[in-house]
Image (cartoon, rainbow, N blue to C red):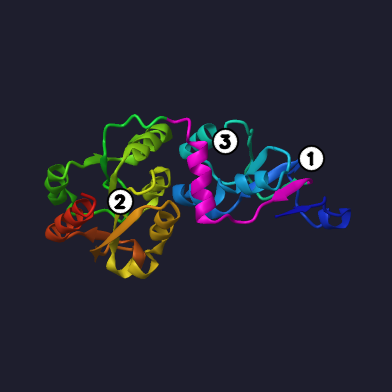
Amino acid sequence: METRDALSNSTIDTLIVDEVLDEPVLLITSHQSSYNYYHFLIDYLPRISAWEKSCRPSVPFFFSSRRTEFHYQCMDLLLNYIHPIYKEGSGILLRDCGVTSTVSKVDAVDFLRERSDHIPSESTAKRVYISRRYASFRRIINEIQLEPILKNFGFKIIYNEDLNLKTQISIFKSAEFVCGAHGAGLANIAFCHRGVSVLEIIMEERFPLGGLFWELACAAELDYHVLRAERVPIIESHLVDGDMYVDPKQFEAALDYMITQKI
């Protein structure tokens, strides 16, 4: 954690400055990865907690990335007392800027659970499957074959893009079992109660990188499981971002194992 004094006049002269902000601000993110729901929710937003724990005063934060609806909803629901400043462009000078370090996954989960405590768990769905049908990659191409299996095990299929954040949080706070392909939507397991079981479906080529949600599940004290799927190439796609084929028998066995071990 550090703060920076105003830049010297000689330094300012070397910059192209389109706008100057004089009021104290806390810089949360300016990085491209903050466009992603997972990274904004888990890696960036919880940095507010690091600032608060340092006993610094509450100040508006400067948010310089491209915004989407989930950015606004996250800040409205989870940072309701802070008034963010939205700016875009590279020529913005912050004269009084605080910068926080990254926070651990445990601290991130604690922060999100605390800030979402006012949202009731009203969903009746106890078993949730997160579909990526409408994503541009990492879709499960034979998902229609998995739907009868999900139905037999009592899973509700949800599409996060069709739900506002408050509804998503309510669903995951109510869930007892969560299943879904590797993707940003699984970030919502941070709102699950301790002990909830999670099955992540991940393509074989990406398995060595699959520790992302395992780490988050450990921080949230969840029961984590993983199922490998076969990669299906997409033309002009990166290697790790193809689609997936899931063997129905393996999928059924993985769900059965996850559920029966809890009984």
Q: In this picture, is 205 found above or below 6?
A: below
Q: Where residue 15 appears, x then y in whole percent?
A: 77, 55
- Judging by the rendered image, the residue that carries numbered circle 1 is 22
What amino acid is at disc 2?
Ser
What amino acid is at disc 1?
Asp
Query: Which image quarter is the N terminus in?
Result: bottom right
**What residue is shown at x 26% (from left), y 47% (from top)?**
133
- Judging by the rendered image, the residue that carries numbered circle 2 is 197
What amino acid is at disc 3?
Leu
**Circle 1 — which element?**
loop
Res 211 quadrant in image: bottom left
- Give the alpha-carbon distance from disc 2 to disc 3, as whole Å: 28 Å
Q: Do the residues bearing badges 1 and 2 touch, measured as CB atoms within 8 Å?
A: no
Query: Furthest-front residue in view?
Result: 263
Label 3: how many Cα within 10 Å (few below 14, some 14–19, many 20+):
some
Asked whether, in this view, residue 129 is left or right of residue 185, the answer is left
Q: Earlier in the sequence, mark 1 or mark 2?
A: 1
- Judging by the rendered image, the residue that carries numbered circle 3 is 79
Magenta segment boundaries in residue numbering: 95-119
The reply to whether residue 34 is in sight is no
Q: Where residue 44 appears, x then y in whole percent?
A: 56, 50
